[in-house]
Amino acid sequence: HTCTHCPITPIYGGRLRLVQPEVVLADIDQQVAAGAGHITFGDPDFFNARPHSLAIAEEFHRRHPDLTFDATIKVEHLVEHADALPRLRELGCLFVTSAFESLNPKILGMLEKGHTPDDIERALDLAEDAGLFLRPTWMAFTPWTSLNDIVETLDFVERRGLVRHVQPVQYALRLLLPPGSPLIEIAAAQGL
């Protein structure tokens, strides 16, 4: 994936790098031995290589059945792989972080997120049906954000019962453009 605002995009250019399962499982075993009861998968998208990540989750659940975890999954992958969400919950997933970023279709297009506001609604419904909580992240301030966008986001968070699932810092995040970001030229051409 090559979301235009992501600092990983200029580095990897959309390429996927997999860490071998035995390496990930050894790290998990070491953390559990040190007393961990919950693991966070810090990858920007747990479902970029769904068979790979699910195989790891299956194996660590077999080894440590009481271990819980969370993962980050793109909205489009939550919708595309809805069939896997109940299994995540069975394996101990407590919540999923997902980069909603905005409810404004224009901003989502500028960021090349790969989802729409309707997809966000669908992802929330699918996660809820699977017994998973979604923890959205937001790009509260971009050059294209209006006051109405901010009000719409706050109303949405309240309407969907997400107040306790959105970390307060999410309401203050602004778009930062790392060197190599394709948005630098776009914003500059727009006088922003």
Image: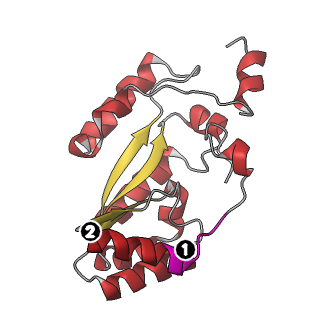
Quadrant assignment, res 96 = bottom left
**Residue 21 is a magenta residue:** yes
Q: Secondary structure at mark 1?
A: helix
Residue 176 point in image, percent of width and height: 57, 27
Residue 109 vs residue 67: left or right? right
**Residue 24 is a magenta residue:** no
N-terminal label among 2 and 1:
2
Mark 2 nearby-residue class (10 Å; few <14, some 14–19, many ≥20): few
For the residue pair 22 and 174, the one nearer the viewer reads as: 22
Can residue 83 be seen in the rendering of this structure? no
Can residue 3 be seen in the rendering of this structure? yes
**In the drawing, what numbered circle is on residue 34?**
2
Q: Which residues are magenta?
A: 17-23
Residue found at the very far bottom of the displayed protein? 62
Quadrant assignment, res 64 = bottom left
Amino acid, disc 1: Arg
Residue, x 62% and y 37% (percent of image)? 5
For the residue pair 101 and 128, the one nearer the viewer reads as: 101
* 69 up-or-down from 10: above or below: below
Residue 39 point in image, percent of width and height: 33, 64
Amino acid, disc 2: Ala
Question: CB atoms at circles 2 and 1 under 8 Å apart?
Answer: no
**Exactly how many numbered labels are in the figure?**
2
Residue, x 54% and y 58% (percent of image)? 76
Give the alpha-carbon distance from disc 2 to disc 1, as whole Å: 28 Å
Residue 8 vs residue 128: left or right? right
Residue 125 point in image, percent of width and height: 35, 60
Residue 101 vs residue 184: left or right? left
Q: Which residue is mark 1?
A: 50
For the residue pair 112 and 21, the one nearer the viewer reads as: 21
